């Protein structure tokens, strides 16, 4: 680096006094936020006490002020929103003029996405819509962001994080835009599909809907999945739980199985079996301790789900059931799924040459299918370097006009939908193959698609 550049960087770097001013401003902002928060809480309590004098929701589902705060459901005929009107208080700065601007920005692509979510998730769909709009209705997202460039509007929110403003604005604006033209199912009392206990559908927190789909499991069972069954005391019980989970998932479970997202498209019967198996699973630390191993691969070996493998600095080198060498358990799960479902595949093929993106022709994919499509296993997308390498392969596939499947860990339970065009055998035959191969001890010899 030249001395001129170095001196320029030094001159532009913040001084001690600048840093002190930033700290003082941050303290002032925090005090101001807490002051506003306290004022809003007082206002919310007064509003809720007034509203609680009459029947708050149908069927007397919310008979107390405390339960009103725990209802995450949005009702089409209730403009106050979820959590006993709390969401409306979060959006105290949202005016009728702002809603009119939002309605103009709200496009038909976003309406279609909202309808799909409302049909699938019913009364919690507004909590889901911001993330789906970002990926599936980018034009609407851009128009909403343009509205939020109004500094006076953003200043009224008392928020310093623009992503928070965008999320709340999309949630609240979409809720009012869609409720003008349609309704959706309301939460009811029902029995948990896992433990059988009765619970109110609007009570489980929103993360349970994101992970397990529409409200079919009580909050107690959802927390049990995250925490694990700490009552397991024998190695035989731990091995049995791991095998049952592998059989329910129809694949080898990863160590972070407790955070596995269940696709909405999965049949309810299979979802129930997976949740029950997850509830019975001890935490990974307890499984390792009971089996006397130091890593999760050792647990899988003890349960006879994998054969011998090698652990480098990253991943786990092991063999798929068709004998292919895999560099991670994620790769093995995908390769085994191909074999079990009759999908003809070639391991680690070379990408065709390209004058700029692959001039040497040495780049490899993870698989090539009989249809000519390529498949990439993307297990570390949180790594910036890994992300850009995958981005280069996506760009190469576009340039070569090759269909590319990018499979991430969250897609493992949805492979049948992702590769529906590649399947050759019937559903019953595929299920039989999958179950019969799960406990094979020795080998026999991604949610995004780009077209």
Image: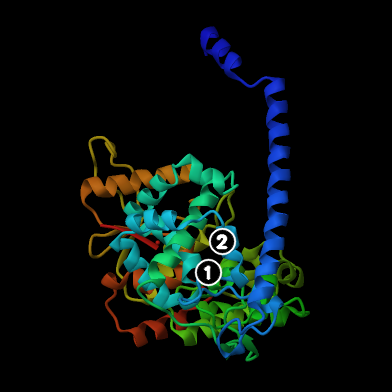
The residue labelled by disc 1 is 210
Q: Quadrant of residue 179?
A: bottom left
Residue 383 in sight here:
no
User: In the drawing, what numbered circle is on residue 309?
Assistant: 2
Q: Residue at x 49, y 46 (%)?
A: 153
Residue 229 image point, x, y percent: 71, 77
Q: Position of residue 108 (x, y in %)?
A: 29, 63
Q: Residues within 10 Å of mark 2 (few under 14, many from 20)?
A: some
Q: Residues within 10 Å of mark 1 (few under 14, many from 20)?
A: some
Q: Is residue 210 visible?
A: yes
Q: Nearer the viewer, residue 182 or 424?
A: 182
Name the mark on residue 99. Answer: none
Q: Is there a contact, CB below 8 Å, between mark 2 and mark 1?
A: no
Residue shown at the point (45%, 68%) measured from the top left: 412
Q: Position of residue 344 (x, y in %)?
A: 29, 69
Look at the picture and state if 218 lies above or below 82: below
The kind of secondary structure element at disc 2 is loop
Rendering coords of residue 367 (x, y %):
34, 59
Residue 422 against residue 215 in the figure, above or below = above
């Amino acid at each position: 680096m030249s001395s001129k550049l170095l001196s320029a960087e030094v001159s532009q770097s913040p001084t001690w006094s600048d840093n002190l001013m930033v700290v003082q401003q941050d303290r002032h902002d925090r005090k101001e936020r807490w002051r506003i928060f306290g004022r809003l809480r007082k206002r919310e309590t007064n509003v809720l006490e007034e509203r609680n004098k009459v029947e708050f929701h149908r069927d007397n589902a919310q008979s107390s002020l405390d339960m009103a705060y725990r209802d995450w459901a949005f009702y089409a005929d209730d403009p106050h929103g979820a959590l006993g009107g709390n969401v409306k208080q979060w959006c105290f700065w949202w005016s009728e003029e702002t809603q009119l601007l939002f309605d103009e920005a709200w496009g038909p692509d976003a309406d279609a996405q909202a309808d799909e979510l409302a049909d699938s998730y019913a009364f919690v769909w507004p909590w889901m819509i911001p993330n789906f709009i970002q990926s599936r209705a980018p034009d609407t997202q851009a128009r909403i962001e343009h509205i939020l460039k109004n500094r006076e509007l953003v200043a009224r929110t008392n928020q310093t994080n623009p992503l928070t403003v965008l999320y709340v604005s999309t949630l609240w604006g979409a809720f009012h835009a869609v409720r003008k033209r349609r309704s959706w199912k309301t939460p009811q009392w029902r029995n948990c599909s896992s433990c059988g206990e009765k619970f109110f559908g609007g009570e489980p927190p929103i993360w349970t809907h994101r992970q397990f789909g529409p409200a079919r499991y009580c909050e107690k069972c959802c927390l049990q999945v995250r925490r694990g069954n700490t009552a397991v005391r024998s190695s035989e019980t731990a091995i049995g739980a791991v095998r049952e989970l592998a059989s329910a998932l129809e694949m080898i479970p990863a160590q972070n199985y407790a955070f596995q997202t269940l696709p909405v498209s999965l049949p309810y019967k299979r979802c129930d079996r997976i949740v029950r198996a997850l509830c019975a699973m001890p935490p990974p630390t307890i499984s390792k301790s009971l089996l006397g191993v130091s890593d999760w691969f050792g647990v899988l070996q003890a349960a006879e789900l994998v054969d011998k493998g090698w652990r480098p600095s990253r991943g786990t080198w092991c063999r798929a059931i068709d004998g292919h060498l895999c560099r991670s358990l994620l790769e093995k799960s995908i390769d085994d799924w191909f074999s079990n479902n009759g999908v003809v595949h070639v391991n680690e093929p070379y990408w065709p040459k390209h004058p700029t993106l692959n001039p040497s022709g040495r780049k490899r994919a993870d698989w090539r299918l009989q249809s000519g499509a390529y498949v990439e296993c993307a297990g570390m997308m949180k790594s910036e370097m890994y992300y850009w390498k995958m981005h280069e392969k996506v760009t190469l596939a576009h340039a070569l006009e090759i269909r590319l499947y990018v499979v991430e860990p969250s897609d493992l339970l949805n492979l049948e939908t992702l590769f529906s065009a590649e399947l050759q055998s019937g559903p019953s035959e595929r299920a039989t193959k999958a179950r019969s191969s799960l406990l094979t001890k020795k080998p026999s010899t991604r949610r995004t698609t780009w077209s």
